[in-house]
Structure formats: structure tokens, C-alpha cells
Amino acid sequence: MSASARTLLSRITTVSAAGTCLLAAACSGTSSAAGHPAQDSPRPTRHIVSYQVDGHGTADITWSGTSGGTATGVTLPWHRTGQRSDGTRGVTLTVVLGRTGGKATCSLTVDGRRVGTSLAQGSYGRAACTTQATATARGNAASDA
């Protein structure tokens, strides 16, 4: 093959590769082969998460999924609300009753829909409410009383 034929073949290959990159970018929702986001990219959906512990007496409470935190020796009932985006880790609420025991129910609500509840009772009774995916608002509850 002559030198001019090799040069022409090289240019055709380069143009073909560039066209493939631009086509891939168009199909993937980016505005250029450089991967810049397209103007119509959706923003993450924000969800309202409510943590609730009903009962009487005192408890140690731990929550995560929004800002998270721990409260020790809290007088019940207790409530906290926060916001989170789709695609972030699950939401958890854990309650541990004190030595004198009692009864407490924890519950998680996402966008007004209850996604988990659990009961703690007795001395050092435990309850845990969790949900894995905020976007689907699917949840499960576990009790360890």
C-alpha cells in the first residue's frame, strides 16, 4: 500500500472514531464527546424523611440517612424530620430503652408514607426501623426486644 493510501486510510479511521464518539455522547444524554451534561439533565428528587419514637420513659436513639445523629436519655415521645435525595444510602432509626424498660414504637415515614415500624419493650429493649431505597420508599422493620 502506498504512503498516500495509508494516510487516507488513517484519516478515514480518525473521522470514523470521532463520529462514533459524538454519536455515543448524543445517545448518553451528554452535549459533547467531552462528557459535559446536557441542559435537560434531571435533578435529584428530594424526599422528606420523618423519624418518630412513641412511648413513655427514656431511650437512646440513633438515626441516619439525613444528617444523622445520636440522642442519649431522651424523654419520649421524640420526632425528627430531614431531607434526602434519591440514590443515597438507606434510612435507619434505632431505639434502645433504659434499664427500667417500658415500651416504645419507632417509625419511619418517607414523603408521608410509612415505610417501617418496630416495637421495643422491656429492660434495654431494642427496635430498629430501616428502609433501603428512598426513591421506591420500600422498607422493612426489624425488632430485637
Image (spheres, rainbow, N blue to C red):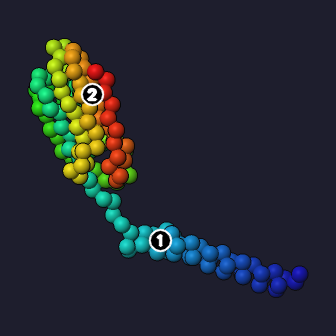
Callout 1 touching callout 2 (CB < 8 Å): no
Could you tell me residue 129's position as x and y percent?
29, 35
* Residue for point 23% across, 52% down: 111
Amino acid type at image mark 1:
Thr
For residue 11, say whether it is visible.
yes
Q: Position of residue 4 (x, y in %)?
A: 82, 86
Q: Earlier in the sequence, mark 1 or mark 2?
A: 1
Q: For mark 1, what is the residue?
A: 30
Graded by Cα atoms within 10 Å as few (under 14), some (14 to 19) or many (20 or more), the crowding at tag 1 reads some
Residue 45: % across, % down:
30, 59
Q: Amino acid at mark 2?
A: Ala
In 3D space, how far apart are the residues under numbered discs 1 and 2 (Cα atoms)? 46 Å
* Residue 81 % position (x, y): 18, 44
Identify which residue is drawn at 17% across, 23% down: 103
**Disc 2: which residue:** 127
Residue density around tag 2, few if under 14, some if 14–19, many if 20 or more, within 10 Å: many
Badge 1 marks a residue whose secondary structure is: loop
Relative side of 58 to 10, left or right: left
Q: Nearer the viewer, residue 99 or 35?
A: 99
